[in-house]
C-alpha cells in the first residue's frame, strides 16, 4: 500500500508544482488530496492526467493522511501545522514559520539528510528559502573540499517567489507599459516591469531585509554555523528562476578548475561554464528543470583562496516544491514513515 498525501496551498504557484512533481517522479502515493482556502473549495487542479477537486484545509481531517506538503504561507502554517502534526501526519512546510525552531529539522537532502532524524518532536520538517536551497547545494561540496570561511551573495530573484500575485503584477505592468496605461504596483513596493527592486520581505532593525537574513541563518543551520554569510536580495523582472552572484572565500587553496570538477560530480549540480558567448545559464533556461546550474566559475584575485560563480535554479522546483518532495522521498527511503493504512 502507498501513502496518502495532502498538498495544502494546491492552487498556488508552489502547490501546483508540488502536484506536478509528485506525478512526474512517481511518488508512491495511493491517494493525493488538494487543499486550499474556502475561496477555492470545489475548483479543480491538475494532477498528472487527472484533475483533483480542491477541498477546504480548515475542516480537513488528517488522521488517515501520512504527509502534508504545505505551501500556504507562514500564518496558515503556524495555525495548522501543529494540529496536523498532532494527528500523526508529517508536515513538510515551505514557509519560514518553522525553519529556525530547534525542534524542527531544516533539510536539503543533498546537504544535511541525517538531520531529518529529529522530525518526530513536532512532526514538522522545514523546507528552506528558495535562494538558500540552490546556494547550499552549491556550497556543500566545495565546503567539504576546502572549508568555506565567508560567502558574499547577491540574488536576482524572480517574481514567482512572491506567489501568483507577483507573476500577475509583472504581466499586468509589462502590458500597461506597452499600451501606455498607468502602471499600478500592489504586490511590490515599486514598479517591477523593466526595473529591479533591492527589497524582498520586511526590513529589520539593522537595515537588512528578512530575506537577506534568512539566507545567512539557514546556511548556518544546514551547512556550518562557522560560515560567515552576507547577502543582498534583489527582485528582478523574471517570471521563474532565481540567479545568484556568489563570492566565496576558503580556508584552503582551491582553483577554479578544481571547483568545476567537484561541482560536476556533486548531487543536484550541473556545470555549464564555457568561456564563450552563451556558455552560461540564464534563469529563463532553468525554468522547469531540477538542477542547480553553476556558470562563470573563476578565481577572485582580490582575496586569498577566493572564487566567484553564478548560480541559477528554478525557484519553484529546487527552491520549493522539488526539495519538499525530495524530503518526502528521504523519509520513505530511510524507513522513517510507514503508510497509515498499511500500519492499521
Ligand atoms: P487560495 O487560492 O484558496 O487562496 P501563492 O503563494 O502562489 O499565492 O499561493 C498561496 C496558496 O495558499 C494558495 O493555494 C492559497 O489558496 C493558499 N492559502 C492562502 N490562505 C489560505 C488559508 N487561510 N487556508 C488555506 N489555504 C490558504
Image (cartoon, rainbow, N blue to C red):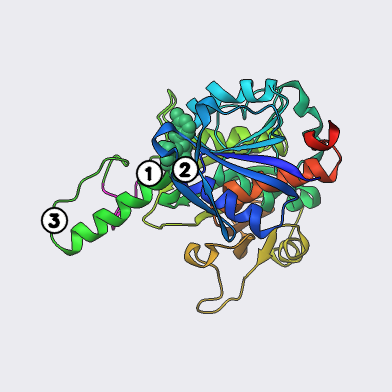
Front one among 221 and 327: 327
Residue at x 69% of width, y 60% of height: 269
Q: Which residue is mark 3?
A: 181
Name the side, left or right, on which 114 lies relative to 129.
Answer: right
Distance CA(mark 3)–CA(mark 1): 25 Å
Q: Which residue is mark 1?
A: 198
User: Is residue 79 one of those drawn in magenta?
Assistant: no
Which image quadrant is residue 313 in? bottom right
Name the side, left or right, on which 223 lies relative to 187.
Answer: right
- Give the structural element (helix, strand or loop) at label 2: strand
Q: Are marks 1 and 2 in contact (CB under 8 Å)?
A: yes
The x, y position of residue 29, in whole percent, is: 72, 47
Name the side, left or right, on which 196 lies relative to 243.
Answer: left
Q: Which residue is mark 2?
A: 232
Residue at x 67% of width, y 34% of height: 220
Mark 2 or mark 3: which is in front?
A: 3
Image quadrant where one finds the C terminus: top right
Residue at x 53% of width, y 33% of height: 213
Vertical order, 243 against 90 (above or below): below
Mark closer to the chain start, 1 or 2: 1
- Give the structural element (helix, strand or loop) at label 1: loop
Distance CA(mark 1)–CA(mark 2): 7 Å
Mark closer to the chain start, 3 or 1: 3
Q: Are marks 3 and 1 in contact (CB under 8 Å)?
A: no
Which image quadrant is residue 259 in? bottom right
Q: Which residues are magenta?
A: 191-198
Image quadrant where one finds the N terminus: top right
Question: Does the beta carbon at disc 1 come under 8 Å from ligand 1?
Answer: no
Front one among 211 and 174: 174
Question: Residue 209: in sight, yes or no?
Answer: no
User: Is residue 193 one of those drawn in magenta?
Assistant: yes
Amino acid at each position: 500500500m502507498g501513502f496518502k498525501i495532502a498538498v495544502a496551498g494546491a492552487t498556488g504557484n508552489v502547490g501546483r508544482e508540488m502536484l506536478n512533481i509528485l506525478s512526474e517522479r512517481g511518488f508512491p502515493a495511493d491517494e493525493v488530496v488538494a487543499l486550499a482556502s474556502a475561496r477555492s473549495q470545489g475548483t479543480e487542479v491538475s494532477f498528472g492526467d487527472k484533475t483533483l477537486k480542491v477541498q477546504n484545509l480548515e475542516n480537513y481531517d488528517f488522521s488517515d493522511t501520512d504527509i502534508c506538503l504545505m505551501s500556504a504561507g507562514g500564518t496558515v502554517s503556524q495555525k495548522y501545522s501543529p494540529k496536523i502534526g498532532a494527528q500523526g501526519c508529517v508536515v513538510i512546510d515551505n514557509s519560514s514559520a518553522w525553519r529556525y525552531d530547534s525542534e524542527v529539522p531544516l533539510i536539503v537532502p543533498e546537504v544535511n539528510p541525517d538531520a531529518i532524524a529529529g522530525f518526530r518532536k513536532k512532526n514538522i520538517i522545514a523546507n528552506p528559502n528558495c535562494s538558500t536551497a540552490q546556494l547550499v547545494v552549491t556550497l556543500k561540496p566545495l565546503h567539504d573540499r576546502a572549508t568555506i570561511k565567508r560567502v558574499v551573495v547577491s540574488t536576482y530573484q524572480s517574481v514567482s517567489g512572491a506567489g501568483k500575485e507577483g507573476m500577475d503584477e509583472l504581466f499586468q505592468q509589462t502590458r500597461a507599459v506597452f499600451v501606455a496605461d498607468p502602471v499600478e504596483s500592489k504586490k511590490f513596493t515599486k514598479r517591477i516591469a523593466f526595473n529591479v527592486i533591492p527589497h524582498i520581505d520586511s526590513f529589520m532593525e539593522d537595515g537588512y531585509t528578512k530575506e537577506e537574513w534568512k539566507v545567512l541563518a539557514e546556511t548556518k543551520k544546514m551547512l556550518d554555523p562557522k560560515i560567515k554569510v552576507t547577502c543582498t536580495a534583489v527582485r528582478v523582472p523574471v517570471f521563474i528562476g532565481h540567479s545568484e552572484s556568489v563570492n566565496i572565500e576558503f580556508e584552503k587553496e582551491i582553483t577554479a578548475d578544481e571547483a568545476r570538477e567537484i561541482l560536476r560530480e556533486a548531487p543536484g549540480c550541473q556545470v555549464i561554464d564555457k568561456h564563450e558567448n552563451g556558455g552560461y545559464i540564464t534563469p529563463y533556461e532553468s525554468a522547469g528543470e531540477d538542477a542547480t546550474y553553476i556558470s562563470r566559475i573563476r578565481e577572485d584575485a582580490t582575496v586569498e583562496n577566493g572564487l566567484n560563480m553564478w548560480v541559477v535554479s528554478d525557484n519553484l522546483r529546487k527552491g520549493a516544491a522539488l526539495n519538499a518532495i525530495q524530503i518526502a522521498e528521504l523519509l520513505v527511503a530511510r524507513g522513517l514513515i510507514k503508510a497509515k493504512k498499511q500500519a492499521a
